[in-house]
Amino acid sequence: MARSSIGAKSKGALGVLARFVDRAMAGFLGVYKPLLCWSLRRRGLLVSAVAALFLASFLLVPRIGVEFAPSADLGETSVTITTAVGSSA
C-alpha cells in the first residue's frame, strides 16, 4: 500500500493529521478488503441473507403503529363558558 506523501513530509498539525488518516485508512482497508473478497465468493449466501432480512423486517410493521409523527400542536385553545340562566355573557 502506498503511503501518503503529505504524512511522510509534513510536520506539525497537518503532518499529524495526515499520518492519522493514513493509519485509519490502512486499518479500514485491512478489514474491508477481506470482507469484500469473502462476500464476492459467497454471493448467493449474501443475497439470500439480505432477502431474508428484508422479508423478516415486514414482521415489524405491526409494531410501528399508524403514525410516524405525532399530531401537531397548533397552539390553539378552546374555551367554553357556561353562565347562569338569564345572565348575559
Image (cartoon, rainbow, N blue to C red):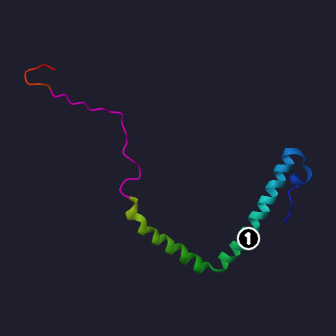
Residue at the location (37% across, 58% down)?
A: 65
Residue at the location (74% across, 63% down)?
A: 28
Asked if the stretch drawn in magenta spans residue 81, the answer is yes
In the picture, which quadrant includes the N terminus? bottom right
In the picture, which quadrant includes the C terminus? top left
Q: Residues within 10 Å of mark 1 (few under 14, many from 20)?
A: few
Does 34 appear above or below 66? Answer: below
Residue 15 position within the rendered picture, expressed as x and y whole percent measured from the top left = 86, 49
Left or right: 54 in relation to 79: right
Q: Report the front residue among 40 and 27.
A: 27
Residue 5 position within the rendered picture, expressed as x and y whole percent measured from the top left = 88, 55
User: Identity of the amino acid at label 1?
Assistant: Lys
Does 21 appear above or below 59? Answer: above
Q: Report the predominant secondary structure element of the magenta stretch.
A: loop
User: Which residue is label 1 attached to?
Assistant: 33
**Quick one: which residue is furthest to the left in this view?**
86
Does 84 appear above or below 27? Answer: above
Residue 63 falls in which quadrant of the image? Answer: bottom left
The boundaries of the magenta stretch are 65-82
Does 15 appear above or below 48? Answer: above
Left or right: 54 in relation to 33: left
